[in-house]
Amino acid sequence: QKSTGGIFRSGGTAPTAVCLSKAAIGAGVLSMSAHAAEVGLVFQLLGLLAGAALTLVSIQMIARASVQTQRWSYEDIGEELFHPAMSMLTGFMNVCNCLGSAA
């Protein structure tokens, strides 16, 4: 089923990019300097590099799963690859992520 909801349709690229950007640029960016002062610049940079590497790998895995299953949302991918209950879990985790970035 194709949705004709425009640029911000359910499961579309634009809303997904906005949600991921909000999560990535959230309050964590504002507190980075304080954390770097607590743990040191070298440890902070190593942590950021590790996080960046994990992000790249996870985005590639999600993109591959999305193309191979022809599913365009986390919940649909989870339902297709695992059990339908997984869509509930991934939806819950996505909501918690969005709420956490808003706090």
Image (cartoon, helix red, strand yellow):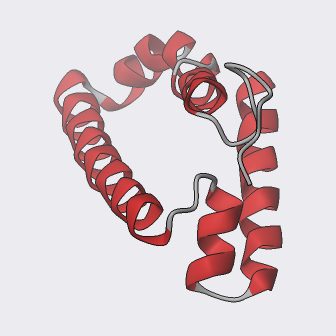
Q: From the top left corner, tell me how far across and down residue 3 is, in percent.
A: 76, 40
Q: Looking at the picture, how far across and down is residue 62, in whole percent? A: 42, 58
Image quadrant holding the C terminus, namely top right
Above or below: residue 88 compared with residue 42: below
Which one is in front, 64 or 55?
Answer: 64
* Residue sitting at x 61%, y 19%: 26
Relative placement, left or right, of 50 versus 82 is: left
State the image quarter where residue 56 is shown: top left
Above-or-below relation of 84 to 23: below
**Does residue 6 sit above or below 53 in this rendering?**
above
| x then y, percent, for residue 74 | 63, 58
| Marker count (numbered) | 0
Kindly identify the residue that appears in the image at 60 percent across and 29 percent down: 23
Q: In this image, 39 relative to 6: left or right?
A: left
Q: Position of residue 19 (x, y in %)?
A: 65, 29
Q: Locate the N terminus and report the quarter of the image it occupies.
A: bottom right
Q: Residue at x 57, y 61 (%)?
A: 71
- Give me the residue at 55% from left, 23% from top: 28
